[in-house]
Image: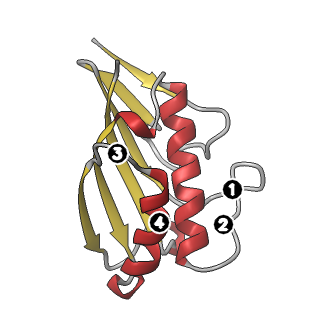
Amino acid sequence: MRRSVAADDAPRAIGPYSQAIEAGGFVFASGQIPTDPGTGEFVAGGVAEQTEQVLKNLSAVLKAAGCGLVDVVKTTVFLADMADFAAMNEVYGRHFEGDLPARSTVQAARLPRDARVEIDAIAVKR
């Protein structure tokens, strides 16, 4: 059994996909970019500000699924430029504590809407 998850306080999907899917006791959250759900525009600033907004959006999607960042077991971070790793990592580290999720970080040739960062996640439903 699986169900689609939609969060009103996160940006709507910009294509034919769900914000997240809950299946088999897990939540598979689609990649989030730094769109402010109130304006539909990217937040101002660099990769640090974008990472902060991405994690807010991801948190909203996970909350709609009945879990949170504490339940995340795996993330994938996509960066437009690996030179942004330290700034992204500093913000990312403030949002995760305890048993940290597994993570992959890759540089992508181009991200949706030319974002500097995109993050997806897999969480466990408790």
* Residue highlighted by disc 4: 112
Q: Quick one: label 4 or label 3, which is nearer the N terminus?
A: 4
In the rendered image, residue 71, in percent from the top left (x then y), is placed at: 36, 33
Q: Please name the residue that numbered disc 3 is placed on.
A: 121
Q: CA distance from mark 1 to mark 2?
A: 6 Å
Answer few, some or many: residues within 10 Å of disc 3's Cα (few below 14, many 20 plus, some between 14 and 19).
many
Say which residue appears at 71% left-offset and 56% top-offset. Answer: 40
Badge 4 vs badge 1, beta-carbon distance below 8 Å = no
CA gap, disc 4 and disc 3: 17 Å
Q: Are marks 1 and 2 in contact (CB under 8 Å)?
A: yes
From the top left corner, tell me how far across and down residue 14 is, in percent: 53, 50
Closest to the camera, between mark 4 and mark 3, is 3
Q: Residue at x 53, y 41 (%)?
A: 59
Judge from the rendering whether residue 103 lies leftward or rightward of residue 3; answer left or right.
Answer: left
Residue 24: mark: none
Camera-near label (1 vs 3) is 3
Name the secondary structure under disc 3: strand
Which image quadrant for residue 79?
Answer: bottom left
Q: CA distance from mark 4 to mark 1?
A: 14 Å
Q: Residue at label 2?
A: 42
Q: Report which residue position mark 1 lands on.
A: 36
Image quadrant containing the N terminus: top left
Q: Give residue 103's position: percent from left, percent from top.
A: 24, 56
Quarter of the image that includes the C terminus? top left
Name the residue at the top extreme. 1
Mark 2–mark 4 Cα distance, whole angstroms, equals: 11 Å
Q: Which amino acid lies under the numbered mark 3 shown in the image of this protein? A: Ala
Q: Earlier in the sequence, mark 1 or mark 3?
A: 1
Q: Amino acid at mark 1?
A: Asp
Measuring from the top left, give residue 47's x and y in whole percent. Answer: 53, 76
Q: Earlier in the sequence, mark 1 or mark 2?
A: 1
